[in-house]
Image (cartoon, coloured by chain):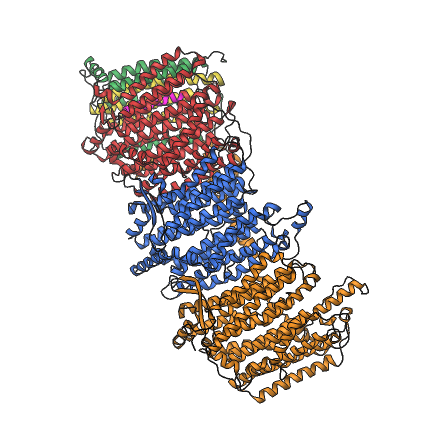
Chain colours: A orange, B yellow, C red, D green, E blue
Amino acid sequence: MLLSQIPTTGFFFLAPWIVFFPVIGLLLNMLIGGRLSEKGVGWLASGASFASFVVSVLLAYSVWTGQGHGESVYLSEWMHVGALQLDWTFRVDSLSTTMMLVVSGVGTLIHIYAIGYMHEDVRFKNDPGRYRRFFVFLNLFIAAMMILVSGDSYMMLFVGWEGVGLCSFLLIGFWYDKDTLGRSSWANSDAAKKAFITNRIGDFGFLIAGFLMFWNLGSFQFDQVFEAAPALAATQPGIIIAITLFMLVGVAGKSAQIPLYVWLPDAMAGPTPVSALIHAATMVTAGVYLITRSAPLYTLVPEAQFVVAMTGAVTALFAATIAVGQYDIKKVLAYSTISQLGFMVAAVGMGAYVAGMFHLVTHAFFKALLFLSAGSVILGLERGHHHLAHHGHHDDHGEVFDPNDMRNMGGMRKTMPVTFWLYMIGTLALAGIFPFAGFWSKDEILADAFREGYTTVYWMLSIAAFFTAFYMGRQIWMVFFGQARHEAAAHAEESPRIITVPLMVLAALSVLGGALNLPGLHTLTDWLEHTIEVHAGEFLISVALISTVLALAGVFVSWLIYGRNPLKAGQPDPLKRPLGLLFTGMENKWFVDEGYWAVFVDRYVDLSRFLADVIDWRFWHDWFHEKVIAGTYNWVSNIGLNLYADQRGIDALANGLGTLTQNLSASMRKVQNGFVRSYALSVLLGVVLILGYLLLK
Amino acid sequence: MVPQTYYIALSAVLFTLGALGVLVRRNALIIFMSVELMLNAANLAFVAFANTYQHLNGQIIVFFVIAVAAAEVAVGLALIVAIFKTRQSIDVDTMSSLKG
Amino acid sequence: MTQVDFYVLLPLIILVTWACALLLVDLFIPKERKWLTALLAALGLALTLGFSLSQLGLENTGFKEMVVVDGFSVFVNALLLLSGLLSVALAYGYLKRMGIERGEYYTLMLFSISGMMLMAQAADLIIVFLALELLSLPLYVLSAFARPRADSEESGLKYFLLGAFSSGFVLYGIALVYGATAATSLTGIVAAASNGPLTGSGNTLLLTIGAALILVGLGFKVAAVPFHMWTPDVYQGAPTAVTAFMAAGAKIAGFAALLRVFATAFPSIAADMTPVLQAISALTMIVGNLIAISQTDIKRMLAYSSIAHAGYILMAFVPYGNPEVAPVSVAAGLFYLVAYALTSFGAWSVVIAVEQKEGKGLAISDYAGLGRKYPALAAAMTIFMLSLTGFPPTLGLVGKFYLFRAVIAGGFIPLAIIGMVTSLVSAYYYLRVVVTMYMQDGEPETEREFWLGLTTAGTALVIVIVSLVPQGLFTWASEAVLRLF
Amino acid sequence: MSVDLILFFVLALVAVAAAIGMLLSQNAVYSALFLVINFATVAVFYLLLGAPFIAMAQITVYAGAIMVLFLFVIMLLGAEKLAPGKVLPYQRPLAIGLAVLLVAEAAYLLLSRVQSVAAIVTPTVETNTVEEIRRLGMALFSDYLLPFEVTSVVLLVAMVGAIVLTIREKGEQG
Amino acid sequence: MEFLLQPLTLVTFFPLLGVLVLLILPGENKSLMRWTALVTSLVTFGISLWVLGMFNPSNPNLQLVAKYSWIQVAGWNIQYHMGVDGLSILLLLLTTFLTPISILSTWTAVEERVRDFMVFFLLLEVGMTGVFLAQDLFLFYIFWEFTLVPMYFLIGIWGGPRRIYAAIKFFLYTMAGSILMLLAILWLGIEGGTFSVPELIAAGGIPADIQFWLFLAFTAAFAIKVPMWPLHSWLPDAHVEAPTAGSVILAGVLLKMGTYGFLRFNIPLFPQAALQLAPWVALFATIGILYGAAVSYAQADVKKLVAYSSVSHLGFVMLGMFALNSQGMQGAILQMVNHGLSTGALFLLVGMIYEQTHTREIKVYGGLWKITPIFGSVMLIVALSSMGLPGLNGFVGEFTILLGAWGAGMPGGAFESFGGVWWAGLSALGVIMAAIYILFMFQRMFLGPEGSIVGETRQHGHGLRDLNWREILTILPLLIFIFWIGLYPKPFFDLMGPTVDNLVAALQTAKLAMP
């Protein structure tokens, strides 16, 4: 269904403000933030984000009241070059407003959460000056993300796409001079760089897709592209396949799919709100949004759809296995995010766009909840550690305390009860336990996979779901149950309200989120139907049963291993012995990073060093230009001099040349040595030569 | 009858000998004499041609050449004398400090 | 002698008369007031210049077609007289400083200029020969003028011996031409070449050989390779003021004679001569520029540079026998000659300013720090170096542009390329002077003399200004050569 | 072979021999004397070619005045002989080679390329008269007035030059 | 007087007035000299804005033409012919805009021979402006060569330790290139009977095979200047040794003279050769993009890094230009401006830190963002602009270029005969590689732990300071344009659009005429 171009009543004209508000917020904070109190800075940013949320609600309302008719809101011209006509135009329809609501809604909550979290974080890391910077970046992120979801063309989307990449870079590298443990290090900035560059690889794919699109479909504007696509698909489906697959490269970069997912785990170096907002709830789902948005293209080429679905499924399973072997509380969640993104990508790949979007939304809720709760745990642990340091009765042997390491935790349900319950809700939602939000959305994906005949995908996802339940269970047991394995865990303190209240909101959403698209009601389906061609999925009781059983089995197995016999301090993971090498693989992320380094990164560094030092400098600059060109030049000029005067040079020259030249130059030297008679000889030589030429000609 | 060519050939030979003198002798005075020989050879050619064409032009030119040669000699000898005063030598090979 | 004869040669007559008078007057000027001689010489030159310019538009022959006045001769005469004036300005302080101030200097210079002017006006080979001697003899003497300085004497002797040697070739060449055509007047030769006694092909060959020998002699005067070897030694050894005079004057005169003789008398053998000229020109550019690179003495460097520039100018004469392109080409040559003469005077004036007694201050390294200590002098030198390289905004660039355009239009593209490449080569050594002046530290000493400074500043300004409005000079040069072809 | 031809060859032989003698003699005085012989021989040629005035000038100016000047300078300087020097060993063979080439070129030009068969007009008694010399004088002062005047200037310059080069300035050494 | 009051004449030669004033200023009052130069360059900028005001963007032809007969003799037809159109108006503004900024950047950096420095700088401005405005080949050649001289001095006198070497190399390489161009110019002048570019274009009719050679001859000059790979070897030397202001102008304007030359002369004068050779230019441009980016990454010297990045960036310009369609060419022109702004700003910023630390080695830096937050933020923006982040200027240029290049690879496009869309595809990899070296530079200098230089400067008692007001003022205008062009490039595209469209249409006509 195409957008109505006829202006309707409503609040559509407000669309640009979803971007303007955060921009105003960040500008204000940049310019006058220095004079505001810490709270002031935080609330200003949160207010900006909230204003954006309000506008999103108004826009959604407008779409709602307009029976789903969206509108393009033209702001200004951007690039008009020949056939290229790009404008800053905002697209308000059911799909984009969904994303806006998620982004600004979750975003606002996380802003508020960050007021508290960052207050403590900057103090722990001993650099309060960064507080303001954080909120500036956060607002910038909201602005970029809003551009991404509201752009009316692929290129405007791309602006947001790269913009969020930049914010991701800035926020991952927020503690750019320290590592996650607060030690002076390059680690965090390396992680940030890695994220940006990996994303750029994806963006390369996006760009190529864009070029193909423009020159074959004639536009970047969504409607125009979709309008032109069927005709092209009929004649040259290969081009549509190429477009969609190159786009998939972009998706893989942004949504952390195989093979470009490697940046996401490292991105956990950023402060926890960032992990929750950017690297779980919003930015990483941009790829899913992109494919959903491009549904008219993907549906034209089943081959591409299959590739997308397989990519998602493989990623989902692969990441889930890695999550099993992690100790860092955030890393587990990070791999879980990759895995869940795999679910979504698989869903949209299969054409189950609603399922994908549904999972996107619910995932945003519960994964944000989980991350923030994890943040709360970390803060609690840090508080505990801090407390120890202040009261002097701790065993500080100079060892570095890692508040993210689950091996340092244990039994925290007593010290941090609120967080524990919130975490539990998140876990259940993620594991897909009825009736939490995750259950419904995940189930819809599985059901669609089953029904659409993607059997392989279905089974892979199901296994991944099992693993999900298992590693979440493992996490719960390791963190909250058993005994504290570190003094800090024992002394952990519950987080303040400012942190827990947003969590509660998210927890509520995680519980109720499933209501968005309950089987039979299809609220979300109906809503999105205004924008993309979708069909309501049917609820398959068999699928639901299998997945629930798998999830429960996962939790149960985790209890068997981790719950029944809680881990002791210093004890290795109980899975390590039975699984052996397999577990080592999981623990070490299947050595993918190392592989990439060995195959690509180091090679690139070598290549560029080689080009720079050997080819460009030693060969081209020094050897060719200095020796060959300049050398020849000097050599030639020296012949001139040497034949006249410098005997040394003559000898050198003569040694290097043949006997004939040697004799010739030697005799020339005798002739031309400052003697007047030699000069006369030269004149006579000229005469003889000229006359000879004229006579014999 | 002597062909005109013979005279020209003779003048060429004399000219070449004069040039050779410039090239092989080190004595500035003899070099100078060799130059005079060259001029002399040219004069011979002039007169020979003048004879062929039965012109006076050739002869008149020779007259001028002789006069100019005298002028050259005046300057040249003065120069040689001046140099001899400074260096006590008229070997041109010793005058090779300027080179390169 | 008729009135016409008189008018044709009026400037020359005035100059010679003036020179003779000066010779006498000088006897009565006391040693410490020799500036008066310089002034009088300059006055004479200026006067002659005025008369010479008054001949503009005059076209006539005189003395039984022995001499001719036309646009070309006026152009060259004016240039020569200007060179003379500049030379006087350069010499005035220099001679005093070097302790060789004598009145005969100026007299000899005037005589030499007379010879040069006669070269430009000569319409008969015998006049060419006499003029050659008239211009050369004073130069031999002037080269050795700084006696008993060994360098100066050596340069004088070398110049003299080689000069006499080469004039032998000219003379023999004239003899052969006479033998081939029964004429020595340029018009006579060309008439004979078309319908005169030149019947057999062998006589044409004789003519060609004669022309070639004349080319050798004149090539020697303009320092073309391989007749150039005297140049660096003589330029180095001679008093710098003389060198400056030689570098410009002798070259101008040599080219003027070459041009007039070949264009007027030998167009018929152009097909034979063009390759020779081409080869000489190419060799001259290459050898001059290449050897100049390795020079450490500024006078020698400028000497090689003057050789190289002879090559450039010679390029313009290569197509002399082709009436389609020759006028433009030769006009370009004349223009370039002006550019070169002015620039070279400028450069020599700086050399003189920096030169100290006992031959000090002549190494290029002595110029270090000039840019900081004497910015104006260094700026002027930079302009001269840029002009010699052929860089804007100087006359050198306009000249080269004009020249290369003519050469390409004549179809001598390889020659043009050699010219361009060698000017690139030349940038290297000209720039070295600039580098030394501005980018190396040193404590140079210079002499500040009014006339010298005026010459430096004046030539620098003219080089820049005329390069911006070259139309007049272009037109003049183009019109000057019109009658030749 | 006619008498003319024999005379020519004999004189030519003398002239060339004298020239070679000048080239070869180690003593500058001998060189000068050889040159005088050469000049004199050439003067005879001039007579044979019908140029008595030039022949006379040759004898008086060249062989007479100029060579005497040379001899005078040689004696004055005492520079008859030079100390032996071996600075340019390749100069001589190269020079001779070039000279041979030059002669060969001349021979090629004159003998095979120039088809002039003009013979020398033997002077008659009429031509060798004062009338002839008068004609020459007339030409000198009418047609050749300018060269004549120029020559005079050249001579003047030579004089001035010679003076400049040899005059002893006040306070100058030696 | 009428001649002098022509707007284009005025904008070109106005700096000479400043030169004159500087020359007659007595004494050694450095501050007075700086102000004189600054005011002169600002007035020149004002005049260029006046020119902009009179410029009619919808007119594709030359405007504000000043045309006087200059040298008319013997088949010569040289005119003083200045004009501005869509191809040059932006570059004119860029020149007059960057000059005062560069002068401002020397305020404390140049203490020696201030007068000379300013004189050379203003002379340089004259040359550069002239290059962009001259419409007569002879006049162009004069300006072109003239720019070498002041730049040569700027590098040679105020440069780094190997300045003489760098200066001579710069001079000789550039001059070597212009030799063949001179040959071609002369050929054109002789054959066409005029040196006026518009007249020569209008006359057309150069046979295709001759076009080929002339094209190559012009290319020799321009490719060295750009510099196109593999003729870039002079660039790192010149950049590293040049003083900051020199680097800014060198990167900002002088290199553009090469790309501009292609646009102004090669393409319109030899359209068939351009069409024929476009894929080959694209080949070298692509290699340049990738090679420059790869080599940048391995540099230890930050100025060298930026210098090599220029090779990469100008590769983009060349690629876009020879796409020979409106996207590519407009993108290329805009990218010239962008590169001037971004790389100019990078050099300025590097100069600002160099002034304090006297080292350009990347490895001694680190963690500067905390110490100098404004500096860090500005550098971040500029770096992002340089790597083509959407929303900033670099993206608009690179995107349109790549888009155009891709289009050129499509059937009927300029690259169809050889390489096709591969050029655009491979060049797009440069986007990734740009991120690699730019982020590497930013990370190693501004992120991470404090580098050794921080401690060193502290030991000297003062520590590193953040940007002062003058420096902010210097860099701020650049930042404004970086955002402006990124977000709303319409005014810029509008300025060049009609002219480029005209050119593209002419190329289409030429293509039809090809066998």
- Residue in the picture at 40% in, 64% down: A84
**Image spot of residue A599 (x, y percent):** 58, 65
- Magenta stretch prevailing secondary structure: helix
- Relative depth, front residue between A589 and A265: A265
- Relative depth, front residue between A435 and B86: A435
Q: In this view, does C221 lie above or below A431?
A: above
Q: Can residue A655 be seen in this view?
A: no
Say which quadrant the C terminus of chain A sits in.
Answer: top left
- Relative depth, front residue between A493 and A187: A493
Query: In which quarter of the view is residue A495 placed?
Result: bottom right
Q: In this view, does C186 lie above or below A87?
A: above
- Residue in the picture at 51% in, 66% down: A17
| Stretch in magenta | C125-140
Residue at the front extreme? Answer: A9
Query: In which quarter of the view is residue A551 placed?
Result: bottom right
Say which quadrant the N terminus of chain A sits in.
Answer: bottom left
- Relative depth, front residue between E432 and A397: A397
Query: In which quarter of the view is residue E328 placed?
Result: bottom left
**Image spot of residue C173 (x, y percent):** 30, 28
**Image spot of residue C305 (x, y percent):** 42, 34
Residue at the bottom extreme? Answer: A542
Asked if residue D138 lies in the magenta stretch, the reply is no
Q: Is residue E113 above or below residue E185?
A: above
Asked if residue C133 lies in the magenta stretch, the reply is yes
Q: Is residue C77 visible?
A: yes
- Residue in the picture at 68% in, 47% down: E458
